[in-house]
Image (spheres, rainbow, N blue to C red):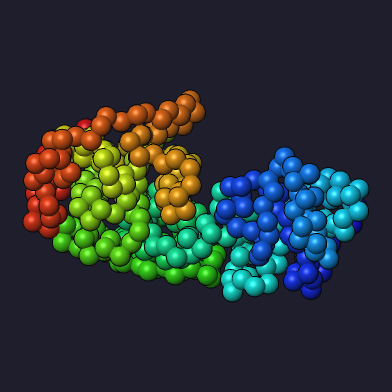
């Protein structure tokens, strides 16, 4: 069985027939230039007929890592075909992709680009996308770390707070040296030091009815990483009005929940929870939180954004993930249908502009505990 390296292949591409035996899905997300697809299980007779019709100088067969393609090459040589196995397979070619203008950058993402669901096409979608995170606390810092590492090209951070020493056990972007610093500045510094290929835009402000529509308007996806219920309703309403997909999450103690919304006949956050309750809504400072829970839930939010951008997998649209960190029970609950009486997306919606409906984003009463 004869092997050929990626460097050797580059020199003989024009005279070689490349045969990709990965799945059709993997091939659809990226392949070596001019390669033909013969997905496993390979129909050898059909492949041999194709090769004899083309009559190339050499045939180079590749799979993901260069293992399964060895078997095909061994069989082809029995037909007196000048066949070679690409050492390291598509993974190796992807890492050393000479013609890609983002070759060096792709090394950074190579371990996710080899996923058949993602490939070069998916990575390019991430590179060209814009995601906003509202809130750079426990949820936000976890989501930010993974969105930046995944290569989301532009990430917006909306946060008006400073780093406090009590944040550090769960807000993983910050260190003791950041205490007293603006969160957006500390987050931008850390994220850019970890990935020089992305653009971080910081907004040193809190989201309000006056500014949120302007903040989110140019983004493809929004992550609600706040810990105030008023702001959660505000984010929902602004995104629904602007038809911008978003992911909500909430955490408390050992528990967390996540749901997403995309334009269409889908229930939004207000469809489910209707309005701000007229009673006490605890937050992390008052009721406590285990940092690992925020890491889990924030990571799910990042994954929802990645899936939306790359159009892979199934999002939590019309569903809610509930996580119990004490028992490790995880449930995905099917949500009720879109609420026809919803104030923002119902048939007789009363909220069409958050700026002119500021009273909808105030807690009417807070009870003591």
Q: Against 173, is 154 above or below? A: below
Q: Against 325, is 7 above or below? A: below
Quarter of the figure that contains the C terminus: top left
Who's the residue at 14% across and 54% down the image?
354
Left or right of 197: which side holds 322?
A: left
Q: Choose top left, top right, bottom left or bottom right for residue 81.
A: bottom right
Q: Nearer the viewer, residue 159 or 195?
A: 195
Q: Position of residue 86 (x, y in %)?
A: 79, 58
Who's the residue at 71% across and 42% down the image?
40
Who's the residue at 68% across and 46% down the image?
39
Left or right of 197: which side holds 185?
A: left
Q: Nearer the viewer, residue 362 or 34?
A: 34
Who's the residue at 21% across and 40% down the image?
270
Q: Position of residue 72 (x, y in %)?
A: 81, 47
Q: Nearer the viewer, residue 294 or 343?
A: 343
Q: Against 251, is 160 above or below? A: below
Instruction: Give the residue furthest to the front.
Output: 53
Q: Position of residue 130 (x, y in %)?
A: 39, 62
Q: Position of residue 234 (x, y in %)?
A: 20, 50
Number of numbered labels in the structure image = 0
Q: Is residue 228 visible?
A: no
Q: Is residue 102 visible?
A: yes
């Amino acid at each position: 069985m004869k092997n050929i390296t990626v460097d050797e292949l580059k020199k003989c591409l024009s005279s070689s027939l490349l045969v990709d035996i990965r799945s059709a899905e993997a091939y659809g997300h990226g392949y070596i230039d001019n390669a033909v697809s013969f997905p496993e299980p390979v129909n050898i007779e059909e492949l041999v007929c194709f090769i004899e019709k083309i009559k190339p100088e050499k045939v180079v067969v590749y799979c993901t890592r260069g293992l399964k393609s060895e078997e095909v090459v061994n069989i082809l040589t029995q037909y007196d075909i000048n066949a070679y196995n690409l050492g390291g397979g598509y993974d190796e070619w992807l890492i050393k992709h000479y013609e890609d203008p983002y070759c060096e950058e792709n090394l950074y993402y190579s371990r996710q680009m080899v996923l058949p669901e993602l490939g070069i096409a998916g990575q390019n979608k991430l590179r060209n996308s814009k995601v906003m995170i509202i809130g750079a606390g426990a949820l936000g810092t976890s989501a930010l770390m993974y969105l930046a590492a995944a290569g989301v090209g532009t990430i917006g951070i909306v946060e008006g707070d400073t780093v406090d020493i009590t944040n550090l056990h769960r807000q993983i972007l910050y260190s003791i040296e950041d205490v007293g610093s603006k969160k957006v500045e500390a987050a931008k510094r850390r994220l850019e030091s970890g990935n020089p290929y992305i653009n971080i835009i910081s907004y040193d402000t809190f989201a309000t009815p006056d500014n949120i529509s302007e903040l989110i308007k140019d983004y493809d996806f929004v992550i609600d990483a706040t810990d105030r219920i008023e702001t959660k309703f505000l984010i929902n309403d602004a995104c629904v009005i602007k038809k911008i997909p978003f992911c909500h999450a909430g955490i408390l103690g050992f528990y967390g929940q996540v749901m997403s919304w995309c334009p269409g006949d889908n229930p939004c956050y207000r469809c489910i929870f209707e309005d701000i309750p007229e009673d006490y809504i605890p937050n992390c400072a008052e009721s406590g939180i285990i940092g690992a829970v925020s890491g889990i839930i924030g990571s799910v939010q990042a994954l929802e954004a990645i899936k939306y951008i790359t159009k892979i997998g199934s999002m939590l649209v019309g569903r809610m993930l509930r996580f119990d960190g004490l028992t490790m029970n995880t449930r995905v609950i099917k949500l009720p249908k879109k609420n026809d009486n919803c104030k923002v997306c119902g048939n007789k919606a009363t909220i069409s502009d958050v700026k002119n409906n500021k009273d909808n984003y105030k807690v009417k009463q807070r009870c003591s505990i």
